[in-house]
Every structure is written in structure tokens, then in C-alpha cells.
Image (tube, helix red, strand yellow):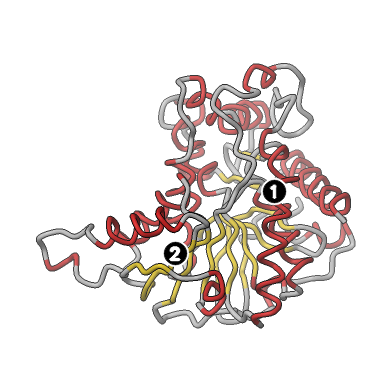
Amino acid sequence: MKSIRDLYADTGMSYDPATAGCPIELGKKQRVSIVALGDVGATMLIGLRLLGAPVIQDIGIFDISGRNTARLEMEINQIYGPGDWCQGMPPVEVIGEDEIFQRDVVLFCASRGVPPVKSGEKESQERPGAGGGPEKPAVDVRMVQLEANREIIRHYGELARKAGFRGLFCVISDPVDPLCAAFLDSSGLEPCKIKGFGLGVMNARARYYSQRDARFSRFLTDGRVFGPHGDGLVVADSVRDYDDDLSLELTGLTRDANIKVRDLGFKPYIAPALSSGALSVISLLRGEWHYSSLFLGGAYLGIRNRMTAEGDQFEDVPLDDRLYSRILKSYQELVEIRKNMN
């Protein structure tokens, strides 16, 4: 049986995140900045304010709308409870664009290409998928966002380069993995200083369906998710006793969970902002296992990992050959996307 580390031999990779070092000092409270405070950024900010006290010193917010940041500075700093346990919640302050990279951790939430509600959902059931699930969206709206959002992130890549940024840059915007690669190429930073956060909500969505259908119940203890946030996602019902048919079905449900919310007439941003954003970032800063994207030589790939003082340690368990083939295909597709961006 193969494992994630076999991707190195099968794709000619040479970069090892485990020996790359850590861009922040674990164990101390970090100064955080958030770029763009739309639906996702503002919701994530609430989560960080409520839960980030053990690992976050303060939060700087930047948005092209000064009225928005002024409102959020007031509202978020007015979140406080009657008990002593509320003490230490990180304060929020408005910062300028020139101050973004003066902090330890930057959370990038900017997006120009968010599709409107009810846009493109009807195509989602039209063509079969190869490895990503029994059905695959004809139009992956996240990839539609790539063209617009990569120009934005390249701008911030240039800012990071000029500032000599030495901290950690976290991509929350879609499509997470290609945008990580775009920032890597434009900023000139070491790959270990860039991580993508889109897979946490896919794990949460898989758990949601596994709690409601006993056929998928093994996911709650042995299941894993791999790959990008969207088309190319790989869900395994169990890494100990993998069932390919059940895993493909659960992958389809998980990948298209956002469409269910859109069909109700709402944008699906709450779960991503908290599961992929606030909760995963806090777990990262605590040095705990979480889902995020690591650079593996040719592209960023979402896997279960944790940050250590020596570098990023990813979970490397034996994988069923069919599961490994799905992950390999997903990674190769991400490599091709990165090549086509250049």
C-alpha cells in the first residue's frame, strides 16, 4: 500500500515540508491581520474574536471600504460577555494596506469573483467525474473565480515581497490551492510561509452527512478528506477499511453541499468561514492536527497536517490503492492548473 509520501516518487517532487522550518514562533500569541472583510472575512473575524484568545494577541483588519472596517472595529470590540472567561479576547483595530505584512499571520479573504446565488447550480449534475465522485460539476464556480482573484493575490504577493514578510500567509479565498501557488510565484516567499484553508469545511460537511446516514458512519472515526476545496475533492469513508463506492458517493454529497444552501437562496459562507477559517487557523496556531494545504513540490494539496518547530508534519498513513490513485490524480490536476497560470 502507498501513502502520501509516495507522491514524491510518483511525480518527481523533491520539496519536503517537514524540514522547511516554521515561519512563526509556536507557543506565543500571534499578531494577525485580515485582508478583506466581506461575508467570509467578517464571519471568520467573529470566530477569531470569540475563540482566539489562547493564540492571538490582536487582529488588524483591512478592507477597501473604510466604512466597513470602521463598523467592524466597533461591533467586534463590543462582543464581550459578563464572565471572567471573556478576558483576553483579541482586540481588533483598523490598519492600512502598508501595515498588513507587519504582523505574524496574514489571512487573505479578498475575492472579486464570488458567483451570485443560483448561478451555475443547474449544471452541477450533468457530467460524470473521474475520481472525484460519481457526479462532477460541469462548471466549477471556484475555478471561475481564479482568473479574477489571482490578480488580486498577485498584488499582495508584490506587497509581501517589498515588505520582506517573514510570517505566515494563509489563503481563505477560492480557489484556495491555485491561489496559494499564485501567491508563491508572485511573492518569492518560501513555500512553508504559505498555507491554504479550504478543506476544513469539506471535512465538516462529510461529517454532517455521515451523522445522518449510517452507511457513512465510519467517516466519523476513520474518515479523511484530501485535495482541493471543490472539483477534485477526495473523501475517504475510512482509511483503515476503504470502500470505494461509499467514498465516491460521500465525495459527491460533500462537494455539492454548498449547492444545497444556494438552492435555498443563500450564499454558503458561514460554515467555510468558521470550519476552514477560524477553527482551522486556531488549530494551526495551537500546533494541532487540522486540514490545510501544503506545498508538495509542484502544487499545494489539502491534507491533514500540523505545524511543528521543524516544519509541517503531514499524516502519512497506508492508503488503499484506489484511494491513492484518486489523490494522485487530484494532485496532478493541481500541478497542471499551476502550470497553466504561468
Against 237, residue 45 (above or below) is: below
**Which quadrant would residue 49 be assigned to in this image?**
bottom left
Point 42% across, 49% down: residue:
274
Observer-nearest residue: 338 or 300? 338
Q: Most extreme residue toward the left, as rendered?
A: 82
What residue would you read off at disc 1? Answer: 319
Mark 1 closeness class: few <14, some 14–19, many ≥20 residues within 10 Å: many
Point 35% across, 56% down: residue:
72
Q: Position of residue 172 (x, y in %)?
A: 56, 54
Q: Secondary structure at mark 1?
A: loop
Point 71% across, 77% down: residue:
161
Amino acid carrying label 2: it is Ile
Against 187, residue 117 (above or below) is: above
In the picture, measured across the screen, residue 8 lies left or right of residue 180, that is right
Point 36% across, 76% down: residue:
57
What residue would you read off at disc 2? Answer: 61
In the picture, measured across the screen, residue 232 lies left or right of residue 206, that is right
Q: CA distance from mark 2 to mark 1?
A: 41 Å
The label on residue 13 is none
Cβ–Cβ under 8 Å for marks 2 and 1: no
Against 289, residue 336 (above or below) is: above
Q: Earlier in the sequence, mark 2 or mark 1?
A: 2
In the picture, measured across the screen, residue 137 lies left or right of residue 41, that is right
Observer-nearest residue: 324 or 258? 258
Amino acid carrying label 1: it is Leu
